Image (cartoon, helix red, strand yellow):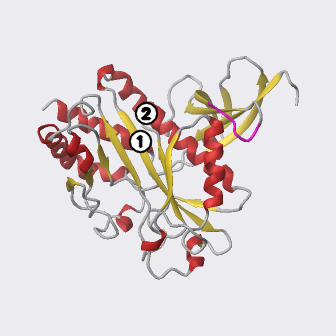
Amino acid sequence: MDTNRQRVEYIWLDGNYPLPQLRSKTRFIEKKSPIPNWNFDGGSTKQGTLIDSDRCLKMVRTYKDPFIKDGLLAFCEVSYHDGSPHESNSRFHLRNLSDSDPVEEGYLVGFEQEFTFINPASMEPLGLLLSPKEQGQYYCGVGCMNQIGRYVLDDFECACAKAGLKLDGVNAEVMPGQWEFQTHAQGPLQAADDLWVARYLLDRVCEDKPLIVSYDPKPADEFNGAGCHTNISTSSMRKSFKADTWTPIMEQLKKDHEKYIEICGEGLERRMTGACETSDFKKFTWGVGDRGASVRIPQLVVNSGFGYFEDRRPCANIDPYKVLYSLISSIKKASLL
């Protein structure tokens, strides 16, 4: 490769609905030059038609490419060539909401992303190879009969570290062959961007295994489903978060619940049944330390008098931009009561 040029992998979200799919393509540019906007065929990504196919990729965040020395990952928004955002660009709406918020709100967000490894030969969860009869022994399990896929997670962790993407933790989940990674608490846009790029890195790591990464909310009926629990706080909550503060927020979340669950992931009704550590999607509940509630306030938060709350409704296959737009909107409305 020409040492005066740099490899840039453009990453974007396509027009697949309800969950966008990741796309990427490579460009070589002169070193130290700005990363230019780039054209792509929207007719092949559900973002255009044959006669109106040209769409634009605009870089919004960069990461080091963990797979190529001195390469970059350029995470992009999709727009028309007049600069207006494409209809599939849900990041644009969260960006506008974040820009309109006072700086002192100081939202911090961390995601707990669960996922399941699928055997491409059988298209079944890989953990079923363990012939599980019950699921309790697999959570944070150790040993070849208690977990499956750790070698993949090791490679994934290394890829995230090389990319400069912070993870706060990784663990095997309750269903065999199912795992979770936790993203570092950051501002809403950074947190959502990092989640998408982490998903991209995980898919790339699995390309040569080969394994399929599934975000299906309920990959096996008899076992726990897969969620993307969303932890959120404001600067004021991190100073004081007690009953008089959280009650109006919970009341507003209850009012917005019916609309909110529409963006909590396709197949939500299969996962949120009220069993297997979920609440019933038909109603909103909240509680202290309650993992069967829609929203959990951790016991540690109650003891300390400040902190965050955990929204347990989002499924593994959420679009984080839409979820955060709705959550932040509800918090803002509650603060005006």
Query: How far separated are the C-alphas under marks 2 and 1?
Result: 7 Å
- Res 277 visible: yes
The kind of residue tagged 2 is: Gln
The residue at which mark 1 appears reads as 110
Residue that appears at 48% across and 32% down: 190
Q: Which mark sits nearer the N-terminus, 2 or 1? A: 1
Q: Range of the magenta residues?
A: 63-68
Residue 65, which numbered label?
none
The residue at which mark 2 appears reads as 186
Name the outermost residue toward the top: 33
Report if the CB atoms under discs 2 and 1 are less than 8 Å apart.
yes
In which quadrant of the rendered image does the N terminus lie?
Answer: top right
Q: Position of residue 45 (x, y in %)?
A: 62, 45
Residue that appears at 40% across and 42% down: 322
Q: Nearer the viewer, residue 295 or 136?
A: 136
Q: Is residue 209 above or below residue 27?
A: below
Q: Nearer the viewer, residue 249 or 34?
A: 249
For label 2, count other residues whose C-alpha is less than 10 Å away and answer few (under 14), some (14-19) or many (20+): some
- Dot 1 falls on a residue whose secondary structure is strand
